[in-house]
Amino acid sequence: KDQLDLADDIEGERSRQIDTILEKTYYNVDTHPSESLDWFNVLIAQTIQQFREEAWQKDNIMHSLNSFIERKAPELPSYLDDIKITELDIGDDFPIFSNCRIQYTPNSNKKKLEAKIDIDLNDRLAVGVETKLLLNYPKPSIASLPINLTVAIIRFQACLTVSLTKAEEFVSIASSDDDSDTGYFLIFSFAPEYRMEFETDSLIGARSKLENIPKIGRVIEYQIKKWFVERCVEPRFQFVKLPSMWPRSRNTRKAEFDDTESPKDN
Amino acid sequence: KDQLDLADDIEGERSRQIDTILEKTYYNVDTHPSESLDWFNVLIAQTIQQFREEAWQKDNIMHSLNSFIERKAPELPSYLDDIKITELDIGDDFPIFSNCRIQYTPNSNKKKLEAKIDIDLNDRLAVGVETKLLLNYPKPSIASLPINLTVAIIRFQACLTVSLTKAEEFVSIASSDDDSDTGYFLIFSFAPEYRMEFETDSLIGARSKLENIPKIGRVIEYQIKKWFVERCVEPRFQFVKLPSMWPRSRNTRKAEFDDTESPKDN
């Protein structure tokens, strides 16, 4: 009986702490209007732009994609030969985050808070794909037909959940590095009702039979969605260790305005 | 002449890219209203709360503070003996971030964008200090008077500048670890017109002469401000490497809702 009382006390205390947090940050979960993230969209867009300027990034990505596909080869239908990514379009638009609101984390008994943010991306993220359609009858690979197509994601719309935590319950028990498990983590996850729209086309100039393209496009679409769901759609989430923001000598730099000041000052 | 034209072209191109970013994120630097960060205040407060719950954190901080003071000993006035931190109050309120707006980075010729955010902290962050006032005449340390005081920061108000960058120009040239220099960095800095208010008091029950307390309090206040300015007040800034947010198997976890699901799923 005493243990139950203690558990109740701890529960009650944690609820009160959450109430105190909301009070001291002037946030009423029931009435606070959602907030815009336009400033954040600008900062993120700036880094995406920098990323796009680096031509070698595309090579890196294509390399990673091809490695990933090699590992997935056993899962692919037997009528498809090796798939190879030959081109990459990393888009030229930017994600728009908006409508940010705080809620109690579901199933947390009002003891945790998280942010929900809408994300919308209208762009064209495309891969050029080279593969072969195999005829396996009457014998395996008795004939093959080269197929070249492009598969593009043209719309991504979802609701993102974000929180910060020490989250000891998610820290790897097997981790040998003490340091890596202390500190703060960012948790993010997408709601299952996300929208990811694809557009599949034959590669310009390729002499593929048009009726095969949609079928292969769907195989690729399925693999992409599977990759996404397995990693960051609820109940799965990404758990990323954040660096400490505490000001330190070694993280200190000095802005350079003229030739007499050095850019790095420790 | 060709080189100048090329330089102008590159400059013009970068300005156009910034314009494109602002256009595609619907952000007009001249007219966009500032944005609130109430959701962020809640998430930050939640982690600060978790931090405060860990009693051992206070011990760690006191240990770090005492090590820091030891290193600073040569800078302290000769009339003060060793300073020791004996108590710590890490507060019970939370910082309020607000009024977020995007601007062109000064001195960047409109080629970089950054966010400016107001921060206000009304709290009591205090240290209990034990030291001795030394009488050095006619001989060094001929007499000493034990002094116990508390020094507290009771208000911090500032304007924070934040941006994200690849910032190759700030990456350490001497770094031997390739990996640590690629990726994205968070840059943050406080404007010089910050406000940090202190309150100094004799420790309750201490029999210190009251007129010595303000003098020693000012020595400590000076050291704290110096520590702050040397690290993160313009033109100095903190340059912190951010982890990749790209979804990965190893960062994947699964939310536990009942006993049959494991909390860690790789």
Image: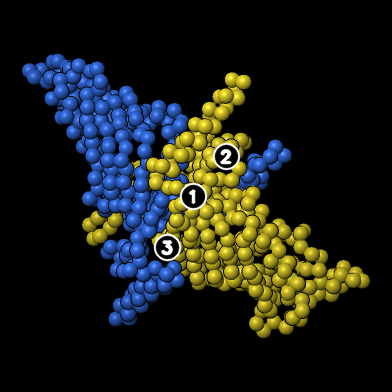
Chain colours: A blue, B yellow
* Foreground of the two, A219 or B78: A219
Locate residue A170, reporting x and y percent.
36, 55
Which dot marks residue B109? 2
Q: In the visual, does B145 lie left or right of A112?
A: right
The amino acid pointed to by label 3 is Asp
**Pointer 1 residue:** B30
**Cα separation between marks 1 and 3:** 23 Å
Label for residue B38? 3
Residue drawn at 54 percent across, 67 percent down: B121
| Residue B197: % across, % down | 63, 69
Pick out the residue farthest to the right: B138
**Nearest to N terminus: mark 1 or mark 3:** 1
Mark 3 element type:
helix
Q: Mark 2 falls within which chain?
A: B
Between marks 3 and 2 in the image, the one whose residue lies nearer the viewer:
2
B226 left or right, relative to A245: right
